[in-house]
Image: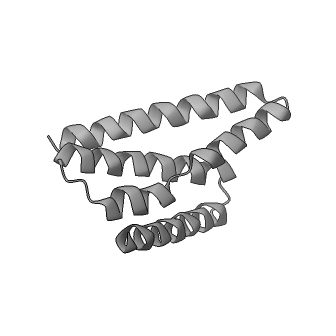
Amino acid sequence: MIGIAIGGFLGAITRYLCYLLVESKMWQPKAATWLVNSTGSFALGLFIGSGNLPVFWITGFLGAFTTFSTMALDVVKDLEDGKWLQGCGYILSTLASGLLLFSLGYVLMQ
């Protein structure tokens, strides 16, 4: 349990630092969410593909690093603002990249 808590702490801090980095480059705010979710999907694929399932990394770090809820919030904001194409494109690109990168990580470790 302590390992999961430490992993979660480090994952949350790493996500925050990624947000600061991406926003300092003046990219769209959603780019940071897409980046952490895509990177997290790839890392999860690597772990699952290797058969190595450390809870520190999977449940702790990646659980706190990735964020479905922030992606959902971003999409809802777009839809409320009438930006249907942008919102739908964002959710589709996030899901597609997550599945693709998870699969890539998984296959690389086979």
> Would residue 34 appear left or right of 58 to someone viewing this image?
right
* Res 28 seen here: no
Q: Residue at x 71, y 44 (%)?
A: 73
Q: Is residue 9 above or below residue 71?
A: below
Residue occupying the far front of the picture: 1
Q: Residue at x 53, y 71 (%)?
A: 13
Q: List x then y, in percent, for residue 7.
A: 41, 68
Quadrant location of the N terminus? bottom left
Residue occupying the far left of the picture: 110
Quadrant location of the C terminus? top left
Q: Residue at x 35, y 71 (%)?
A: 3
Count of labels in the image: 0
* Res 12 seen here: yes
Colouring scheme, one of rainbow, by chain, secondary structure, one colour: one colour
Q: Nearer the viewer, residue 24 or 58?
A: 58
Q: List x then y, in percent, for residue 55.
A: 32, 60
Q: Nearer the viewer, residue 16 or 26?
A: 16
Q: Is residue 18 above or below residue 31?
A: below
Q: Is residue 55 above or below residue 9?
A: above
> Would residue 6 appear left or right of 75 to someone viewing this image?
left
Q: List x then y, in percent, for residue 12.
A: 53, 66
Q: Nearer the viewer, residue 43 or 24?
A: 43
Figure quadrant of residue 4: bottom left
> Would residue 91 appear left or right of 60 to someone viewing this image?
right
> Would residue 61 appear left or right of 21 to someone viewing this image?
left
